[in-house]
Amino acid sequence: MPTNAAFAARRSAAIPAGLSKHLDVYIEKAENAELWDVEGKRYIDFAAGIAVNNTGHRHPRVVERVRRQLDKVTHTSFQTTPYIDYVAVCEKLNALVPGDFPKKTFLVSTGAEAIENAAKIARAATGRSAFVAFSGGFHGRTLMAMTLTGKTTPYKAGFGPLVPDVFHLPFPIAYHGISEQESLTALDRFFRSEVDPTRVAGIFVEPVQGEGGFYPAPVTFLRTLREICDEHGILLIADEIQTGFARTGKMFAMEHAGVAADIVTMAKGLGGGFPIAAVTGRASIMDKIPMGGVGSTFAGNPLSCAASLAVLDIIEDEKLIDRANEVGRRLTDVFRDWQEGNEFACIGEVRSLGAMVAIEFVRDRETRQPWPELVKAITHTAAEKGLLLLSCGVHGNVVRVLTPLTIPFEHLDEGIAILKDSLRAALEKAESGQ
């Protein structure tokens, strides 16, 4: 019988240690919000492949659409011999992405690739070179994406020099004492003392910081960024890679602020488990890309396009935007009850936008000192009990919950119960000094 330990040994021998490893669990099959490893152990999935499986694992409509495509064509490379599903995905995204103006889209394979291309487009369209991003943000691991990312370890350490003309400013996080006004003042000071705004091509922002800790950007902050960009001819670039496709209770998180970005990057939930990403922008901007300036051999693969078309239909037909809000409400109601009780004084803050939910753990609520060791113990204990959880945050002290939006509520409740038991067990170990 295959074992997780045997596969872990094979991994260690074959794969560089730099590819991070959360658990030594090897999954054999999955269905909606459940996973089974090679030893037959069942898990409730509160990770969704890092917000990829918004429509659940192997949604029947995704599987059927891809299966039909397998019988037609699996690859030609769209630039050489195109196919209609690529066009259909782009048409749908042009209609769905916020903004009452003509838009155009092209497809790539990963979120980092979308970020890289967004930066290229911004420079080509504006003739400017500089970019502003925010501390704590995550945009990917390729060179420009890594440079834009606002966290050094493990994403930047040892990989310099990075791309020049990229600058980071504080992201507004009230819980950590960084007000919206402080962030805007820092931006104004930056324009006055560091880089003239006429040299800035774009401002990259996550409407909810993902890897950074699930901190939603204040609505008024995003609206003010839009005004600043308009004033100075800067492009506002929204990274919706983790927040897109119903995750936050809107199709895109920027809709909560009523703000339309000039360029939007997408990936993860678009493919329902198949690799696909997209860049959508104002048509007037996108048409400034020189011929051949974007493209990729595998981008917009026919199988991934088929999956995406199924995903977009599922989100609409199964009302997953409404369901994201219900899932998020159920989770936050429970987590805030824990926070308000006496048992879990380690819960500093519970925050959410739709079904993008986080619990921040601290050693002391007054000092708000991060407690990453507790979070690591929680996630590993939860896995032992049959629940997959992920951490995040600059200090690694945040548990993030990203269930499939299609999760049956009995599985949601089961996962919540395991999380509570895991938290208790982790606290007992911490108190006993283990």
Image (cartoon, grey):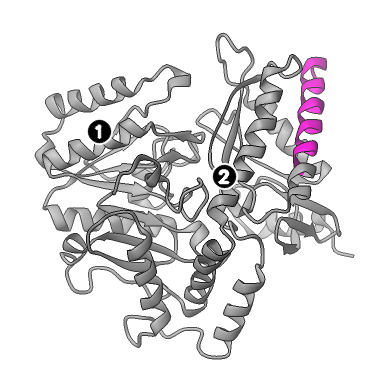
Q: Secondary structure at mark 2?
A: helix
Residue 427 among magenta residues: yes
Q: Position of residue 159 (x, y in %)?
A: 40, 44
Q: Decide: is 209 above or below 113.
A: above
| Residue positioned most to the bottom | 72
Q: Decide: is 140 above or below 401.
A: below
- Region in magenta: 415-434
Which residue in the protein does label 1 denote? 224
Q: Decide: is 83 above or below 272.
A: below
Q: Nearer the viewer, mark 2 or mark 1?
A: 2
Residue 230 among magenta residues: no
In the image: residue 273, left or right of residue 253: right
Which residue in the protein does label 2 denote? 325
Dominant SS of magenta comes to helix
Camera sees residue 166:
no
Tag 2: residue type?
Asn
Measuring 76% from the left and 17% from the top, which residue is drawn there?
343
Q: Position of residue 212 (x, y in %)?
A: 48, 35
Which circle's residue, 2 or 1, is located before the other in the chain?
1
